[in-house]
Amino acid sequence: MLPNIASHRSSFPTRALHSQALRLVATAPAAFQPTGVFVFVGIRMAHYRIGVMFSANGPYGVVARTLLNGALLAFAELEAAGGPVTLEPVIVDPHGDNAAYRRFSLDLLGSGIRNVIGCYTSSSRKEVIPCFEKHDGLLWYPSHYEGFESCDNVIYTGASPNQHVLPLAEYLAANVGLRGFCIGSNYIWAWENNRIFREAFGAMSGTVVAERYFPVGDTDFERVAETIVEQKPDFVFNNLIGTSAYAFFRAFHAVCARQGIDRARTLPVASCTLAEPELVEIGREAAEGNLSSSVYFASLQTPANLAFTSAYARMFPDAPIPCADAEASYMAVKLLAGALARAGTDEARAVRAAVAGQRLEAPQGEVRIDPDTFHAWLTPRIARSATDFQFQVLLEAPHPVAPDPYLVQSSPRLSVPMRPPKLRVVQ
């Protein structure tokens, strides 16, 4: 039995959603609109239930709530626009428990739902993929990840490693220093990201002086913060997630402050996960001056993003500003909407074929789904956190960059010169 959906809405605002099924406008694949809504003409009305599976509660709930909010905003916009297709979101919350992710996936798929937007961590994604393969469903995965994966039952709308790890490695080598200390949560996201970073950074004459891993949810970082200061690296490459990351930033800032180290200027923490809502959790002093590599920041001054952030604030007035994860889940709903209208069915193979090559004018800029990898073309950016809990963009790619999940164009193991996307100076 599926859980009572209403019980999963109690901890976040959903005032723009109504109890009736959500309508969406479908569009022609080539059409661009600021809101990213697709418009198709002459499509027979159809009703689809869509799974929405994020851990709004749990150790990484701060980010997961933004993923959920981004999806809910897209559903609400599509409902308000009206159209020939109706969607009904079915919301579940695994509370960060991988076994619950698997259980909910089986429940959703077993009830006839074929498309699910969900998961934040790579461990949860790995846990549920066999369920989608067995039951022929599609998981729309809206989070940046470590790459080295391709599945016919997954559409990846978050960044691939060539869109976030490699640009950061290049930036650090060129602008910060050649000695890094890697720290991360003890699971595949951190293991693989640190491996990719170590190989890329090494190809740029950089050195990783040490790596440390901690269980997800661990919050005791005083000792490792002192160790980092003793090692005297030029920067820290952080792959901790959730409450662990927030505790580390605070502990590291405190240790640096006690020793008179200007952390923001001489020993910055660089991440591929650090997002705007997390800056609030970390606290103003510890959050300032950190580097983040991402494809989206809420501070982007584009018409599409200004419309997105305004709509987000209206729908979630008590929530922090959106981040890359919110934008990726927002995009996933819009892309799924267009694919469903184009396919005329929610059957996985037909929807996958329909989304191949599909384009969207997203808040970050133009996005499209690569027909070979079913990952997204996205625009890499490097930014520094400021005192207002936002990011100041320093560099950005001049156009969307093709996903390269297996790094076949940039792997030092293949003796191919490192080819991170070239970024232009913004600030």
Image: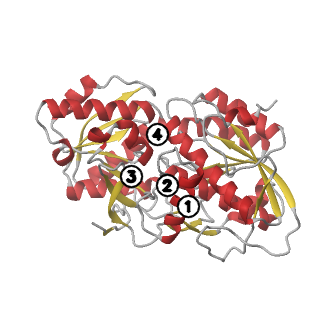
> Could you say where residue 348 lies in the image, as x and y percent from the top left?
77, 54
Q: Quadrant of residue 207?
A: top left
- How many residues crowd mark 4 within 10 Å: few (<14), some (14–19), many (20+)? many
Residue designated by label 1: 376
Report how far apart the C-alphas of labels 3 and 2 lie in the structure. Answer: 9 Å
| Mark 4 residue type | Trp
Q: Are marks 3 and 4 in contact (CB under 8 Å)?
A: no
Q: Are marks 4 and 2 in contact (CB under 8 Å)?
A: no
Report how far apart the C-alphas of labels 4 and 2 lie in the structure. Answer: 13 Å
Q: Which of disc 4 and disc 3 is earlier in sequence?
A: 3
Report how far apart the C-alphas of labels 1 and 2 lie in the structure. Answer: 7 Å
Element assignment for label 3: helix
Residue beneath the point at 17% across and 48% down: 265
| Mark 2 residue type | Ala
Q: Quadrant of residue 124?
A: top right
Element assignment for label 2: loop
- Between 195 and 264, the one nearer to me in the picture: 264
Report how far apart the C-alphas of labels 3 and 1 lie in the structure. Answer: 16 Å
Question: Which label is found at residue 165?
Answer: 3
Q: Which of disc 2 and disc 4 is earlier in sequence?
A: 2
Question: Which label is found at residue 189?
Answer: 4
Residue designated by label 2: 159
Position of 186 with respect to 263 (left or right) is right
Above or below — where is 12 with respect to 41?
above
Q: Which of disc 2 and disc 1 is earlier in sequence?
A: 2
Element assignment for label 4: helix
> Could you say where residue 89 lies in the image, as x and y percent from the top left?
74, 47
Position of 6 with respect to 164 (left or right) is right
Q: Which of disc 1 and disc 3 is earlier in sequence?
A: 3
- How many residues crowd mark 2 within 10 Å: few (<14), some (14–19), many (20+)? many
